[in-house]
Amino acid sequence: MIFGRGRFPAAVADFESAVRAQDADAAERAFERLSRGLGKAGDHDLREAGPRLAALLPDVPPGPRAVIAVMVGACVERGADPMACAAPVLAGATEAFEAAETLCERWTAAGRGALPGHDGEGLTDEDFERIGFEPVMAWQSLPQFEMACVAMLNAPSVRREAPGKEELRAAVSRIAEAFGDTFKCLVHALDVLDDEPLVAIDRATGAGFALRMSGVGDNFQLHTLLAGVLIGGGHLPGEAPSAEAVAVCRDRPGTTPTTGSFNLVGADGEWIWNEGRPSDIPVVPFGDGVRLVVIDPPPYRRNWDAGRFFPGMTGELELERVLSAQESAALLAQVAESVH
């Protein structure tokens, strides 16, 4: 059956009415129509549907709740207001991670070995009785909630202003630290920095630069953007990344091969690995405190595909000013003192 014009909004309205009335049969029928029609709906209909579906999440049963959250994420990706959608999605995810923690604890206490798959592999019918229906359903829903939350966190407004981020981070961290299931994409998205000051100092020349970064998902992206600003901008010598490599690290879709321009070292003397995140870079007492990287020549040739860890997130790195020679020297002295 062709999901024609107007049918998706009708399915949203029917699902909304059924959930509010707690009519399980009607909600299931409307849910099926929503699932069939999401991919065929127009942008306008999705923009309208996102906040309405998000508002229903607390009243949707545990089974379909994460699927509705993913639908909300799809609506946001097609233009729905992320701030109007984010709070219920983040809260639903936090509730799911907290309930899933019960499964992890009871599974481990029973000596069952490795945790079951989120797809249900390793679970038995008896587990629903021993562990509880909601913890099992919550465990299975975590990858979907991760996907939905990342869609919300792609928006700078959500990262800066949406309530519930810290509660979600704590819930995810407890499972990751105690049971080893890391949810890397969600952890990275929650740790993305915005309007974050960064100081870079070239060890060879002593030149220092005050920059500000937002929406940078990993240090591969940071490395390329930093080289684009400093080498591409004529402030430092070296091999600059191509304009295309810089663009795909900002907002252009896709990836492109690039070569590393330098080696980055933290204030503690440790290498800043490209596989890490900007939030891992140590802070030094300069002004109100800034993350500092020392630039050294590359010890060997590194190649990778430039792009964004989060394709839906715009990355920004702007040069604010060139530091004075005295400022740069003082910071390099701090680095030398901390290393020794």
Image (cartoon, helix red, strand yellow):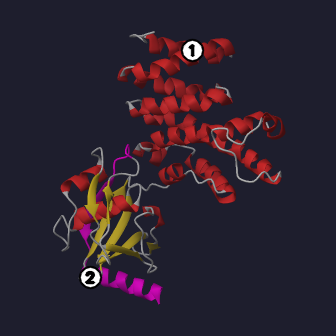
**Would residue 169 appear left or right of 84 to someone viewing this image?**
right
- Quadrant of the image containing the N terminus: top left
**Residue 74, x across and y down, in percent:** 45, 31
Q: Position of residue 101 (x, y in %)?
A: 71, 48
3D distance between C-alphas at marks 1 and 2 = 64 Å
Residue occupying the point 75% across, 45% down:
103
Give the residue pinned by disc 2.
206
Asked which secondary structure carries label 1, the reply is helix
Measured along the vertical axis of the image, is residue 80 above or below residue 110?
above
Residue 303 lies left or right of residue 114; in this view the side is: left
State the image coordinates of residue 189 (x, y, percent, origin top left). 48, 50
Q: Quadrant of residue 288?
A: bottom left
Q: Residues within 10 Å of mark 2 (few under 14, many from 20)?
A: some
For mark 1, what is the residue?
30
Q: State which region is magenta.
A: 311-340
Name the residue: 57% across, 39% down. Answer: 145
Where, by quadrant of the figure, is residue 266 drawn? bottom left
Q: Quadrant of residue 63?
A: top right
In this rendered view, identify the residue nearer to me: 197 or 146: 146
Q: Nearer the viewer, residue 257 or 138?
A: 257
Q: Amino acid at mark 2?
A: Gly
Residue 250 on the magenta segment: no
Image position of 70 with respect to 258: above or below: above
